[in-house]
Image (cartoon, grey):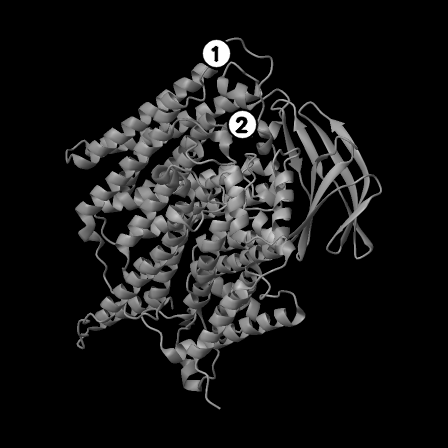
Amino acid sequence: MAELGSFSLLLALALAAYALVAGIIALTKKSEGSDRLGETARRAGIAVFGAVALAAVVLVTATFQNDFSISYILHHSNRDLPIPYKFAVLWSGQEGSLLFWALLLSAYGLILRLRHKVDTRLVAYASVVISAVQVFFLLLVNFAANPFAMTIGTLPPDGFGLNPLLQYPEMVIHPPMLYLGYVGFTVPFAFALAALIMKYPGEKWIHITRRWTMVTWGFLTIGIFLGQHWAYSVLGWGGYWGWDPVENASLMPWLTGTAFLHSVMMQEKRGMLKVWNVWLIFSTFMLSIFGTFLTRSGVVSSVHAFAESSIGPWFVTFLALIFATCLYWFLRNRDHLRSEHRLESLVSRESSFLFNNLILLVACFTVLWGTLFPVLSEWVQGTKVTVGPPFFNRVNIPVALLLLVLTAVGPLLAWRKTSIESLKRNFRIPVISGLAVGALIIAVGYIKPWTEQSALYSFITIVLAVMVAVTIASEFLRGARVIARHTGQNLFASIVHLTRRNTRRYGGYIVHFGVIVIMIGFAGSAFNRDIERELSNGQSMSIGPYTLTMRSNTQDDNPNYASEWAIIDVSKDGKPLTTMYPERRFYKAMQQPQSMVALHSTLKEDLYLVYSGINQDTGNPIIKAHVNPLVLWIWIGVHIMVIGTVIALIPNMAAQRVPVRAPLRATELIADKPGQPVGVGS
Amino acid sequence: MPRITIRRWLQIVLVVGVTVALLGAGDDARFNRLGHKLMCPCGCAEQLLECNHVGCAYSDGMRKELAAAVQTGASDDAILQQFAEKYGTTVLAAPTKHGFDIVAWIMPGVVLVSGAWLAVILIRKWKYRVAPAVQTSATAAQLDAFRARARQETEL
């Protein structure tokens, strides 16, 4: 098995190298055979997928066969590992996850090369760029981190097992989603670099790139939030985001990708910010590689340390090469990126996008700066410092609030220029709604913003979220009323019609709505409460409106792990509510404990129970209970964001010609008068 | 009665906001706040009050130390300094505001302000650039092209 896997990887490397070299020759030599050579490069690129997929299948099959002669399987699996996690072995360690990177990249390359007719020459250039990235990752899995390396010495009877942190259902889908996001940014990068190299005329490449970026961004969004949910459900500290360096690494390309998805509109509609957009895409790709480097190199300490190794220099070299290549082609062809128009007013849609980009990039810089500052501090002053949640929260929360303000303001501004009268007219209702809700919150005492800074931030977040929601609703209603007037449809049907007419714009608004729902969820964290107690049978403790009574404490044992769990009856305001089962497992192969949180979620708050352990003297379990307000809003918001992204990816419905309902004179009835098209917001 | 301008309202909101943000809190709130400004040194990479490791050699003792320190009435800075001296500087969950550490806090603000300043300068520069005069003798085909462009730019 191992030989077949190794051979597949070598074959894949040879094919990728051929696709790269033959592709370059075909594009640079103007001879008769260039086209045929280019076609062989394209086919070699397609074949890379077959070879890498074969290697991945071999590794998974060997995992199922418990082939511990392969060192990777010995270190990341064991005989009693449940079947779904046997698949997860593929990305649970460094060698396997690099193979997974190569597999996803070859899959993206396959789609790109099969769809080459969209623009043969542009795809040929992009294919060369992708081949170069493929060569790097295939060099890594062949020579620096081979997943098929053999076990040295006597074979143990069983493997060392999968890290318990990874033995959770979401871990079967979280890494693939995150990787689909990371790897996917290679495609927009390839198109951007290709367009720059060949001085691509027109904006078609940006349309292609935007769709790829949106798909990739969607995967990264899902991956990040699945990671949050996993952290919330498994790590047992009651939170979902700890500003861990590896979490930060996933956030950075997401922020620059988000900036690109906004600023690309200025290039499409006004031919502006071409240099900016190209560098945003370059940066997003480099940050994806940087994220993989952070995860793998161990340069900063992280809870994701299970993936650390010594391949950092490979990534540093690759990053330097990417940057040098991008800079070279930019300097050489920068004239091609000259803007067609200029900004005309500070109060315009264009400037709101500019400031939106600025804030997203400042957020990205802050995350990068905070992540690397411990390394910088050690280098400059010889002492290491910790840059943890207090820093990131203090710096990023105001930045996020600024972004919320722009999310409320942006859609109300017109392209080119907005008059002050129009501003006043458009802002009146959102501002009044936000302030009214703010006053109501204070009046009912739900939040007392004057008590502490976190409460103040939460209050501002909710007020701004209401403003954004009203802005979005008014955008939908304004367009839908026009459609309803022209077609006679009811308001709901008109909203659907409107959305189908401009899926990107209204899908985008739905994504914004998802973001504000998530922000409201984040705002709830200012009011988290927790309590930790040792509970004997029949004993109770209270937190907020909940009373937790220990019914019993029990144990179980299976081949993979031994577990202890508590059976806790929960009542709320004196009425029985539910029974919860916080659990603690001890995984035998890895000899590591792991908590399994018990959750009772409602829109108002989560009751979150952790089995912290057992008091060895009394034999009683120690239970930590958290009440975390509004957490469910975060997961609902993510679903809304995904729905919005999918809608934005659906092609627009063709403009329909519908008859206008208006009184007509007899003479007009005789005439063959066509209906008028109904436009969005017309 | 004199009319209160928008600028004056903004000033009032700013002053109230800053005052609110700087208001003090009780011992429990101080314990909670300081406990989140310290890291548990057991290697869990969690803040002191978040560490949930069974049998953690540090967190229980440190929480008691923190509670005792808060009771003495020492200032936040003095308490944090006391922990840093005992457990090393990495016990502080964020860089201090002294020496080189202050650079960590300043840089994001510097980048934001410089970025905003640059953006405003660019917009103003572009705004005052003289635009080419509009052709008045456009043909029907040109006008169609202009209309198509306007539709594209205004999303109509």
Query: B94 and A88: which one is in front?
Result: B94
Q: Which quadrant is the C terminus of chain A positioned in?
A: bottom left
Name the residue located 53 percent from the left edge and 39 percent from the top edge: B86
Q: Residue furthest right?
A: A538
Question: Where is residue A113 drawn, in percent x and y?
Answer: 34, 37
**A228 sits left or right of A259 in the view:** right
Q: Amino acid at mark 1?
A: Ile
**A7 sits left or right of A63 in the view:** left
Instruction: Indicate the secondary structure of the residue bearing disc 2.
Output: helix
A193 w.r.t. A682: above or below:
above
Residue A590 seen in render: yes
Name the residue located 37 percent from the left edge and 64 percent from the top edge: A352
The residue marked by circle 2 belongs to what chain?
A: A
Give the residue number, with chain letter if any, for mark 2. A89
Task: For marks 1 and 2, give the one nearer the viewer.
Answer: 1
Query: A32 and A430: which one is in front?
Result: A430
Question: Where is residue A453 drawn, in percent x and y?
Answer: 54, 60
Mark seen at residue A152: 1
Q: Residues within 10 Å of mark 2 (few under 14, many from 20)?
A: many
The residue marked by circle 1 belongs to what chain?
A: A
Question: Where is residue A409 drawn, in percent x and y?
Answer: 43, 68
B46 w.r.t. A436: above or below:
above
Query: B20 and B81: which one is in front?
Result: B81
Comes first in the chain, label 1 or label 2: 2
Instruction: Report whether mark 1 lies on the same chain as mark 2.
Output: yes
Q: Amino acid at mark 2?
A: Val
Residue A476 seen in render: no
Q: Residues within 10 Å of mark 1 (few under 14, many from 20)?
A: few
Question: Where is residue A375 drawn, in percent x and y?
Answer: 39, 38
Give the alpha-carbon distance from disc 1 to disc 2, as whole Å.
20 Å
Q: Quadrant of residue A426?
A: bottom left
